[in-house]
Image (spheres, rainbow, N blue to C red):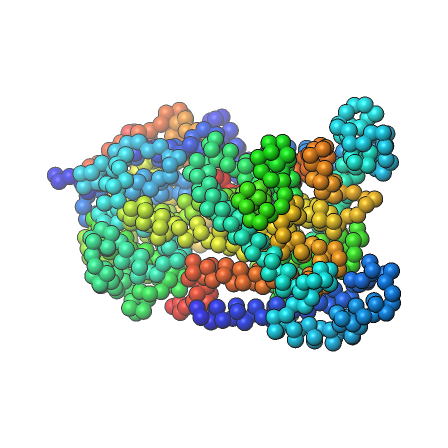
């Protein structure tokens, strides 16, 4: 088990390194640079600017410098937002994004999983059809549409909630973004849990457990729960990725000061350090989540713990 | 005469399908005396497995089950879950067909065996472990101490089936129902597992219902044989009688299909032409076997033969039998 | 035997003969009403995309300054209304439809092509080459697809062709994985061994044996990939990183509509409805295909 964890962690660092390297060089290879918009500046000033951001050095040197600073935790200055370093910007934006993202994921799981089971228990009857249709809608209709629509209904027409802005964390400002972010994941999780529950009910070993005279609660907890959770756990990592992607849109629509917003700004302005910084943060989050998901999965499936076919067979 | 261990009367199982319903088990009746073993033989779709599930109360929600199954005095059809839980695994148990899927993959073999003991007897962990190791030895699992903490995936097919058998026998039930216990195993392993199974069952004096499509297995293991076709019983007799003097044309055809050690090599092996009726299309009008029967007459196609007692221990359902066949 | 018995026997034989799996799957798909509804919906939208510009007297870019932001009306054939610059929405939505569908199909095609080849080669060759190839895929997988695309788009600018390529470059990963998995299992099968022992060249084996067997899951996945691509493009355009004026796409229209939400909600609702409808259609079709190719009886 320890070996399993250790190998996974050991892969994390090189993977991150590859991502950083790829992003860095891709960015530098691009035609045009961050100061193209300021073309009307005097050449000397442009040169000074470039030098300040090390852009006059050969690319490989720039990379070396970047890595060196990275290891010290310095993500560099933001080119677009001149008064801030990238780390500072991320420090401002990350709490917002994390709060929104984690809450969305939590809600999606806590509401979605039981909803799916309810649908399964009423298979093919009215309740199931209703829930399954709602789930299908949640999956098919992207946050791209639901976010503005929610704003239209609740913000403009009914005037119940603020249309945009973080409002220093007031709860009214969080509702619409949260709903928009949660819906797609909730739909997917509900669908997954419904399918999973239906599959599990037909499993031979669940029937065999009943055949041994075990009371239903034991059958559910010790025999059926594990396979029911398995698909949900494997969805954990993609779910986080989905929430991160969704939060970019949400933050844009609602004007929230989260990391996603800086990412888009940085991409539009070709602010290399900012984009790189956000990429590193996101990539780390994804890799860590992948690791956690793998661990959770190994906790459920003994074959992963023992190593497939590792045991002796006569 | 003492009350039989198991009394099945007019057992019927109906599944609601997309178009109409399927009468998988239709009016099955038989008795099983304590200590005896009964083999249920038939093709796939004959209803033999569903009969077993009906007895154990393991049919899915969509199944309608009627009739009566009395086990040691308790009526099982329609019994509440608590009654069934008390009896299942304790007084009667089921050995499933496919060992690869009938053990819970995420729990150790030992944990699964102990669970049975602790739930039924309220035994301590130590006592349960002792009983588990004991039964593992009796079903000939080598090195049980080490195997106790292993997961099912670490066992081969034959070993897994022994564990399944162990789970069925650990509480020393009066009745064990085995649904094709060796069909999913390699041929080389089949005989061994069957031998172990038979030994343990006989040693404990447990009654056995063995479902199989293999007549050879029945010949070596069971006291009585019941032949099923299209959801009904077509013949039921002592094993020796059935093999020596089969009465129903279907039974005869089945026996004729088996190549013997001394049979001459022939160009073509005998088979029974055609296939069993698709029960989803409704019940056949006359005898279900008539389309494939070599001696069928017009009576056979229009009226269904009932089960007639030919002797005290021999019943068969065929119109031609009253003519003294 | 009597007539009834003979008839019964013939019926049995007929049903036992069966169809080829492809034919049976097609029948199941046709019987699935939601899937067929999806096909119909998609056909309608495609028709709209193609015929829309012809039906309307307006074009995408003309500014009708006298009719700014009017609601949908029959007057002057502004059936979907106009936007803040007086441009007719009907034609723009049709143009958006064209672009989205085009991107969806072409990009999926490219992604499938790359993915199938990559996966088939990796799975067939096996060994260390396979390991490295899949490790490359794993590394790329670590970054959510969307980010990779944004990075690529940032680098190479907002060129519409690049959006195609960028999305395609990133979506082939899953297909490669699926195909590799299937290839590995097909490789074990005996007829491949037989072909190999008869001296068939690897490329021949890959094309004649591996690829046809892999087709099933790939088709299902592709059907679900097209809406994903359309969605990604919409997301990008919404953020301003995708399609640029003068071209338009649904994502761009929705973004423009979202900013005019209090004054002219139809600018948001209509393109959004089209996008949603397309998503539904593809999802229904994808589900139908999956059920047809791998029926799981829920009863």
Residue C128 drawn at (x, y percent) = 62, 71
Quadrant location of residue C115? bottom right
Q: In this view, does C259 lie above or below C153?
A: above
Asked if A105 appears above or below C156 in the picture, the reply is above
Q: Is A302 on the left-hand or right-hand side of A76?
A: left
Between A205 and A133, the one nearer to me in the picture: A133
- Residue A75 in the figure: left or right of residue B82: right
Q: In this view, does A240 lie above or below C122?
A: above
* Viewer-nearest residue: A204 or C102: C102
- Across and down, in percent, residue A119 comes to 46, 38
Tell me where residue A73 appears, x and y as whole percent.
61, 70
Residue at 54 percent across and 72 percent down: it is A10
User: Based on the displayed image, in which of its 4 quarters is residue C122 positioned?
Assistant: bottom right
Query: From where the camera sits, is residue A43 visible?
Result: yes
Can residue B239 be seen at all in this image of the molecule? no
Which residue is located at x 71 percent, y 58 percent? A266
Toward which corner of the image does residue C250 lie, by quadrant? top right
Q: Is residue C260 left or right of residue B5?
A: right
C36 is higher (above) or lower (below) than B192? above
What number of labels is visible? 0
- Identify which residue, B37 or C205, lies in the foreground: C205
Quadrant that contains the C terminus of chain B: top left
Measured from the top left, where is residue C290 in percent x and y?
Answer: 58, 44
As drawn, the residue found furthest toward the left would be B1
Residue at 72% from the left image edge and 62% from the top image edge:
A82
Q: In which quarter of the image is the N terminus of chain B?
A: top left
């Amino acid at each position: 088990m320890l070996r399993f964890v250790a190998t996974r962690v050991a892969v994390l660092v090189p993977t991150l390194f590859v991502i950083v390297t790829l992003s860095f060089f891709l960015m530098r290879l691009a035609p045009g640079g961050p100061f193209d918009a300021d073309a009307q500046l005097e050449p000397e000033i442009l040169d000074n600017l470039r030098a300040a951001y090390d852009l006059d050095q050969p690319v490989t040197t720039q990379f070396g410098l970047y890595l060196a600073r990275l290891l010290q935790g310095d993500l560099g200055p933001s080119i677009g937002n001149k008064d801030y370093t990238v780390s500072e910007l991320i420090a401002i934006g990350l709490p917002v994004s994390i709060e929104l993202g984690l809450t969305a994921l939590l809600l999606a799981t806590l509401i979605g999983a039981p909803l799916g089971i309810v649908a399964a228990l009423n298979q093919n009857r009215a309740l199931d059809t209703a829930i399954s249709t709602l789930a299908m809608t949640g999956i098919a209709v992207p946050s791209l549409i639901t976010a503005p629509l929610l704003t239209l209904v609740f913000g403009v027409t009914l005037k119940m909630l603020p249309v945009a802005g973080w409002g220093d964390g007031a709860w009214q400002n969080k509702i619409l973004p949260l709903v928009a972010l949660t819906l797609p994941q909730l739909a997917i999780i509900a669908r997954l849990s419904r399918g999973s529950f239906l599959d599990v009910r037909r499993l031979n070993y669940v029937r065999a457990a009943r055949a041994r005279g075990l009371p239903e609660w034991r059958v559910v907890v010790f025999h059926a729960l594990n396979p029911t959770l398995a698909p949900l756990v494997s969805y954990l990592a993609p779910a986080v990725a989905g929430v991160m992607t969704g939060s970019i849109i949400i933050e844009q629509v609602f004007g929230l000061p989260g990391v996603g917003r800086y990412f888009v700004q940085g991409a539009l302005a070709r602010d290399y350090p900012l984009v790189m910084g956000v990429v590193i943060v996101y990539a780390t989050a994804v890799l860590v989540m992948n690791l956690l998901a793998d661990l959770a999965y190994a906790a459920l499936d003994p074959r992963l713990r023992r190593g497939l076919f590792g045991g002796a067979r006569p | 005469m003492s009350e039989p261990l198991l009394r099945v009367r007019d057992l019927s199982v109906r599944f609601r399908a997309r178009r109409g319903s399927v009468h998988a088990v239709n009016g099955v009746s038989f008795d099983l005396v304590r200590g005896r073993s009964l083999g249920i033989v038939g093709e796939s779709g004959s209803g033999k497995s569903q009969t077993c599930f009906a007895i154990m109360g393991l049919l899915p929600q969509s199944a309608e089950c009627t009739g009566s199954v009395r086990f040691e005095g308790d009526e099982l059809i329609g019994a509440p879950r608590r009654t069934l839980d008390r009896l299942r695994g304790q007084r009667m148990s089921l050995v499933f067909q496919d060992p690869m899927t009938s053990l819970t993959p995420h729990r150790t073999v030992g944990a699964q065996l102990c669970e049975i003991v602790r739930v039924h007897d309220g035994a301590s962990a130590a006592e349960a472990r002792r009983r588990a190791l004991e039964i593992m030895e009796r079903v000939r699992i080598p090195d049980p101490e080490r195997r106790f903490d292993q997961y099912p995936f670490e066992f081969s097919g034959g070993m897994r089936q022994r564990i399944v058998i162990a789970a069925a026998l650990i509480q020393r039930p009066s009745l064990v129902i085995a649904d094709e216990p060796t069909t999913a195993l390699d041929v080389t392993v089949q005989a061994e597992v069957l031998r172990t199974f038979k030994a343990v069952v006989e040693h404990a004096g447990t009654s056995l219902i063995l479902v199989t499509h293999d007549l050879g297995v029945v010949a070596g293991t069971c006291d009585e044989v019941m032949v099923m076709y299209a959801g009904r019983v077509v013949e039921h007799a002592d094993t020796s009688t059935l093999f020596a003097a089969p009465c129903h044309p279907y039974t005869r055809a089945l026996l004729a299909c088996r190549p013997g050690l001394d049979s001459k090599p022939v160009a073509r092996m005998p088979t029974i032409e055609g296939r069993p009726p698709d029960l989803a299309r409704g019940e056949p009008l006359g005898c279900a076997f008539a389309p494939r029967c070599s001696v069928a007459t017009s009576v056979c196609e229009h009226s269904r033969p009932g089960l007639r007692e030919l002797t005290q221990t021999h019943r068969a359902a065929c119109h031609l039998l009253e003519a003294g066949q | 035997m009597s007539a009834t018995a003979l008839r019964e026997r013939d019926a049995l034989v007929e049903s036992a003969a069966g169809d080829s799996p492809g034919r049976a799957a097609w029948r199941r798909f046709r019987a699935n009403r939601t899937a067929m509804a999806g096909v119909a919906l998609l056909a309608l939208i495609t028709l709209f995309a193609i015929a829309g510009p012809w039906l309307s007297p307006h074009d995408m870019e003309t500014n009708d300054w006298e009719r700014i932001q009017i609601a949908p009306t029959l007057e002057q054939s502004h059936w979907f209304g106009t936007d803040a610059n007086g441009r007719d929405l009907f034609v723009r939505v049709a143009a958006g439809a064209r672009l989205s569908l085009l991107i969806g199909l072409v990009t999926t095609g490219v992604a499938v092509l790359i993915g199938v080849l990559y996966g088939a080669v990796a799975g067939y060759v096996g060994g260390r080459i396979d390991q490295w190839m899949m490790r490359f895929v794993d590394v790329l997988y670590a970054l959510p697809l969307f980010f990779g695309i944004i990075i690529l788009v940032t680098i190479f600018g907002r060129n519409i062709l690049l959006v195609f390529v960028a999305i395609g470059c990133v979506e082939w990963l899953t297909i490669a994985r699926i195909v590799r998995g299937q290839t590995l299992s097909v490789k074990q099968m005996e007829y491949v061994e037989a072909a190999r022992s008869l001296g068939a060249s690897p490329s021949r084996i890959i094309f004649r044996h591996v690829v046809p067997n892999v087709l099933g899951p790939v088709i299902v996945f592709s059907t679900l990939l097209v809406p994903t691509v359309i969605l990604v493009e919409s997301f990008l355009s919404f953020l301003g990183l995708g399609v640029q004026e003068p071209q338009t796409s649904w994502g761009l229209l929705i973004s423009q509509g979202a900013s005019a939400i209090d004054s002219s909600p139809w600018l948001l609702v209509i393109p959004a409805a089209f996008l949603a409808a397309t998503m539904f259609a593809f999802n229904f079709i994808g589900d139908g295909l999956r059920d047809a190719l791998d029926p799981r009886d829920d009863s």
